[in-house]
Image (cartoon, grey):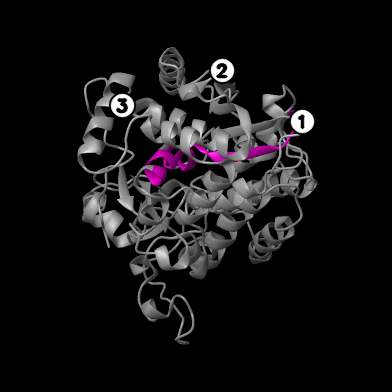
Amino acid sequence: MIKRTDYLTRTYGKPEGWSLRAYEANEANEANEGGLGGYQVARRVLTGMTREQVVDEAKKANIRGRGGAGFPMGVKWSFMPKTVGAKPHYLVVNADEGEPGTHKDRTLMELNPHACVEGCIIACYGIGAHIAYIYVRDELHLSKARLEAAILEARAKGYLGDTPFGKDWPIEVHVHSGAGAYICGEETSMLNSIEGRRGEPRMKPPFPANAGVFGCPTTVNNLETIAAVPTAFGMGAEAFSKLSILHGIGDGGVRLYGVNGHVKKGVVVELAVGPTLNELIYDIGGGVQGDRGVLCVIPGGSSTPVLRPEETVNAPDERLPLHPWHGKSVFDVPLGVDTMRGVGTMLGTCCVTVIAQGTDPVWCMQNLMQFYRHESCGQCTPCREGSAWLERTTSKVLDGKASIGELHDLHDIANGIMGNTICAFGEGTAMPALAFIQKFRAEFEQYVRGERKRADATLTVEPWS
């Protein structure tokens, strides 16, 4: 069910909506509606709550990580040591946003950067940190400029510095540029990058809460996750969670949804958690270009397995969470972290890529495999060699030079990557590959039999003839 909200996006489209003046004007509007806006939420938290109360409140918000994995934010905060000992604590905010098809975090940085800064203040206090690093990929020049300007404005008003809001709890926020490596979206690779090291994932354990950046306790959160914190604390965490139709299964609040690909209107929109794919495609995206049907959808960034509209939910047991949608199309299931896992994919970044009928699924897979081959850091052999092998073999299929045996090899190669790498990049390569191979097996076989040609394949949409 679509439930439009504008807590995170209220400053979007406003004159200089990224400025402190606009953010504090929004504060007045929030106050008139019985809530708190601007930096008044951070003021209330720092001056009126203990660190333990902040973490407990964060848990009630049921904010599932907005970066891909969907881990509960409040639970992650609780992993940090309760006391700040010899080693300082750090907050690291992941704004790398290198996932193909994902384009939401940059809108927050460019159009509502003060929500990101205020969220950092609250999070730092809750986890016992005095310094936050916002890690932004270097290509996002406007995002970095807007964040830097917001930090300067907040510091000039006394919201950052040695005594924010008069509280003896120094907090500083810094923007750190990455060099544009997709692997640095993985949290431990990002920590290495911040330290000036090669962007490669670390073995876990130790986990970042024990030994993160500079070997110190660290919490890593996605940027949208942090930007939602002022809203959750302003209205009350439980009330925030109940905005979602999936509140009952611990997936709360509002979030940004991206719709892109072969839709008539590509857009980033804020909604209460729980719309369906059909609602995003037709009500938000305006339908498919050329009024074609949908071939498949990548639900949350390129690393999430595709879904086809003819797939249905198989949950006959009334005790199963997806039973209310038994027999219905997966496109009619509310988008949530656990509901998407239930239908065999992932919610990921919640930016939906729509692929229209007439698009060649084999070329789609080969296009993705080119990306993953290029972006593999090379540290793990199954990922380094497997991604290249997948790309080469899919290219052979497109060229009509592959055998049926090599189609079987594609499946085996992808399965050989799963679970055999240090970080989730390998799975992010293998899962979409397996989905394309399994759900479009007929199209792959048509290339082997010579019934399809690369020259006829297309990734674009033309009007029906």
Q: What amino acid type should be assigned to the residue bearing mark 3?
A: Tyr
- Residue 306 located left or right of residue 235: right
Disc 2 residue crowd, few under 14, some 14–19, many 20+, Cα 10 Å: some
Q: Which residues are magenta?
A: 214-233
Judge whether 260 appears above or below 347 on screen.
above
Residue hosting label 3: 23
Residue depth check, mark 3 versus mark 1: number of the one nearer the observer:
1
Per the model, the C-alpha gap separating discs 2 and 1 is 19 Å
Label for residue 87?
A: 1
Image point (54%, 52%), residue name: 56
Q: Amino acid at mark 2?
A: Asp
Q: Is residue 12 visible?
A: no
Whichever of callouts 3 and 2 sits on the residue coming sooner in the sequence is 3
The disc labelled 1 sits on which kind of residue?
Lys
Q: Secondary structure at mark 2?
A: loop
Q: Position of residue 438 (x, y in %)?
A: 55, 67
First in sequence: mark 3 vs mark 1: 3
Residue 104, above or below 429: above
Instruction: Quote the CA–CA distance across marks 3 and 2.
Output: 22 Å
Real-space Cα separation, disc 3 to disc 1, in angstroms: 34 Å
Dot 1: what SS?
Answer: loop
Q: Is residue 178 above or below residue 299?
A: above
Neighbour tally class for label 3: few under 14, some 14-19, many 20 plus, Cα within 10 Å: many
* Residue under label 2: 162
Query: Residue placed at 75% from the left, 33% from the top?
Result: 216
Q: Nearer the viewer, residue 123 or 331?
A: 123
Q: Nearer the viewer, mark 2 or mark 1?
A: 2
Queried whether the magenta region covers residue 460, the answer comes back as: no
